[in-house]
Each structure stands twice: as structure tokens, then as C-alpha cells.
Image (cartoon, grey):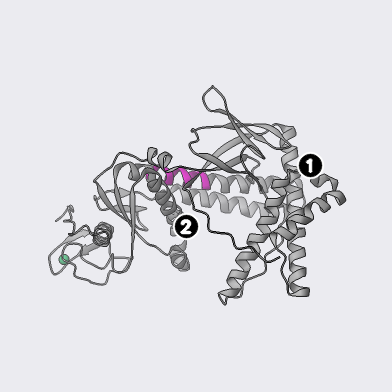
Amino acid sequence: MSKREKPPKEKKPTRTYQFRLYPTHKQERTLEAWLVLCCEVYNAALDERKSAYRIAGGSLSYEDQCAELPGCKEVRPDLALVPSQVLQDVVKRVDLAFAAFFQRVEEGKKPGFPRFKSRFRYHSLTFKQCGNSFKIHTQGRKNRGMLELAKLGQVKMVLHRPITGTPKTAIVKRTPTGKWFVNITVERSPKQTQESHMSPSEKEVGIDVGLKTFAYLSTAEEIANPRFFREDEARLARAQRKLSKAAKGSKEREKKRKIVARTHERIANRRKNFIEQEVCKLVARFGFIAVEALVVRNMVKNPRLAKSIADASWSQFFMRLLATAEEAGRQVVKVNPAYTSQTCSACGRRQPMPLSVRVYECPQCGLVIHRDHNGSLNILANARQACGRAGRVIPEAPGL
Ligand SMILES: [Zn+2]
């Protein structure tokens, strides 16, 4: 009954593509119905586990609960309309939620019990096994594709880029504004991975993320902070105020809720586009990229800085940078952020650097340099050292 020990599978490199889906009205109604049913199954499976844990102190396994699904379908024939693998994945999600819970208990933390999901917060369906519960059809014409889903049929899909690799899972999801997307995860062979690599580049860069500017490069270039996030946030605050004033359950409220959701989506999209563009530019130019290993979560606790940090979305930036660099065969090195702003990048002397001081002036060697530029040079130097590339970089700062 307990979890069987499986030999660790060798992990092949994966990649996830996201494509927009355009289901017909009828398909959309079916997908919506599936989401409601899956949410019900999720909550039922969670409830059963909670009872088992609280009453008997025991635990049910994924296999135990999957074995109950056919019986459930007899009692609730509408469940049979949902592909079996999709339902099994719902049980898997409960299993993962519990595994994470027990993990935290083991670590001596006091985690909250896994929670029931509202049907408004349940918005994705997982299809496993390509060729069985889903298929991908590419058509001759550019961008046209079809995603074939078990028990649903073919859904229009915009293939804005070709898929390379072997598709493993497809997660169909609905955004709060009612758009549909699919995330297709593929596995790649070493050869396919190799093919996606860019031609090698000897160029190196250190990147210092800041508050006044989004990032500063050791090449003395600046990536400006996208201030449009601020404007969007003001718009969001307005929309949220209006929503809170609308009477509960009214049509007006539903309208306002949609406006809030659209604003959220817009902010997320603009942020994503901005980050995507900057990351692509960096990866195309540099073969060796040094960044700080930032603990963003700690920094956000400081309420004054929080807004700007959230604005700048560094963690998203680093995640995209790592993924894109790996895909392109570029090296990204994370360095300890300690003293990167206090150390003189030319002579190594340290001095306190409060956030308000924007220019680094070294009394020992006379270096005068933009604070973040100095940081980026230190980050690059530390990364080089960590990788056995010797030598400090000589700063080419204006005003030297
Ligand atoms: Zn100095």
C-alpha cells in the first residue's frame, strides 16, 4: 500500500511551449464542464485523505485513490465524460499537495493542511501521453495547428513556433479573462538540445539589478526600468476600488471583476514581453553571463522597496535568463551578492555604500564610477574567479 520505491529515471532535458487555443463555443462548454468536474474530484479526493489522516492517522496513496475512480463513475455517470487520464491527474495533484505537506512536517515546520479549491480557482486540465489522450496536428499552412484531445476532438491551435522534441504532456488552461492556452512539454535528445544552441560567443557580461534602473551591465549599458508598470498599477487600484463598491452577486460586480482580471492579465503580459525581449538580447550577445544569486523573497519584506522590486520582476527575469541561456548553450554563473556594491571593482577596497549613494568613489585608487556599474563589474569578476577565469576586469567607466 505504501509508496513503491521506483528507480530514479534519467531526466532528459525538457522544454515547455505555450500556444493559444481557440475552442469552438461547444468545445468551450465541454472544457468548462470538465473543469467543474475535476474541481469536484479534487475536493472529494482531498476530503477523503483528510478523513483518513485525521480519523485513522493513516494515509491513502495515489494508487488507492485512482482505483476508486471507476466506482465513482458508476455513481456519477457524468465523470465518465472526462478522459480517464485527466481525472487520474487530478488525484495526482492531491497526492503532490499531500507530499509537499508531509515534507514540510518532516522539516519541522507547521504547514497548513492542503486546502479545498474553489471552482473559480481551478483552471487547468492535464493530458498525459501524447498519442493517447492528446495529439498534435500540424498543418501545411504557417501557424495553423490542431490539438486533438480525447473525448473532445480537434481544437484550433496557433503554432507560432515549431515544436522540436517529443511531446510528453499537455496542460490546457483557462485564464481569468476566458482565454485558452496549452502548455506542451517536450523531451529532447542530446542532439536536439545541441541543435538549439547558438554559435559560441567569447563575450562576457556581469549584470547588476537595481532599483533606479532595471539592470546595469558591466559593459556600462543600462536597461531602463519599465515605468509603465506603475501606470498599470494605478489603473489596477482604480479597477479594484470600483469592484469592491459593486454589490455582491450583481451583474455590475461581474463586469468589474472582468475588468480587474483583464488589467492583471495586461500587466503580466507587458512584464513578460519586456523580460523576454531583454533576455533574448543578452543571450544573443554574451556567452558568459554573471548574475547575483538574489534572494528576492527576503528583499520584498522591506515594504519600501517592495513595490519597485515587484515592478522590476527580477525573479522572473532570472528564471527566463537561466532557461533561455540553457536552451542556447550559454553559461550563466550565479555569485554571492555579498559586498558586490561595497567593493571597489578596480582595487578591491571595501567601503559602506548606502542605497542613496549613486556614485562609487574610491579613496584608495581614485575610481569614480556609477554605483551599479561597479556592482556589475564585481559580479563579473567574482563569476570569472569562480570558474577559473582569472583576472579582474578593468572598468571602462566614463569619468575615469
Ligand atoms: Zn579602488
Q: Position of residue 306 (x, y in %)?
A: 46, 63
Tag of residue 310: 2
C-alpha span from label 1 to label 2: 42 Å
Say which of 142 and 241 sits in front: 142
The prevailing secondary structure element of the residues shown in magenta is helix
Rendered position, 62 above or below 124: below
Q: Residue 91 in the image: state x and y as whole percent.
A: 70, 56
Q: Do the CB atoms of the residues marked 1 and 2 lie less than 8 Å apart?
A: no
In what quadrant of the picture does the N terminus appear? bottom right
Q: Is residue 356 above or below residue 183?
A: below
Residue that extends furthest to the top in the rendered view of this protein: 140
Q: Which sits earlier in the primary sequence, circle 1 or circle 2?
A: 1
Q: Is residue 269 within the magenta segment?
A: yes
Mark 1 residue type:
Leu
Q: Which residue does the numbered mark 1 point to in the structure image?
A: 81
**254 or 315: which is nearer to us?**
315
Q: Secondary structure at mark 1?
A: helix
Q: Is residue 307 left or right of residue 49?
A: left
Q: Is residue 365 left or right of residue 382?
A: left
Furthest residue to the left? 365
Q: Residue at x 23, y 59 (%)?
A: 388
Residue at (49% x, 32% y) in the render: 162
Q: Is residue 8 left or right of residue 46?
A: left
Q: In the image, what residue type sits under mark 2? A: Ala
Q: Can residue 247 be seen in this snapshot? A: no
**Is residue 51 something one can see in this rendering?**
yes
Q: Which residues are magenta?
A: 268-278
Q: Residue 366's image quarter? A: bottom left
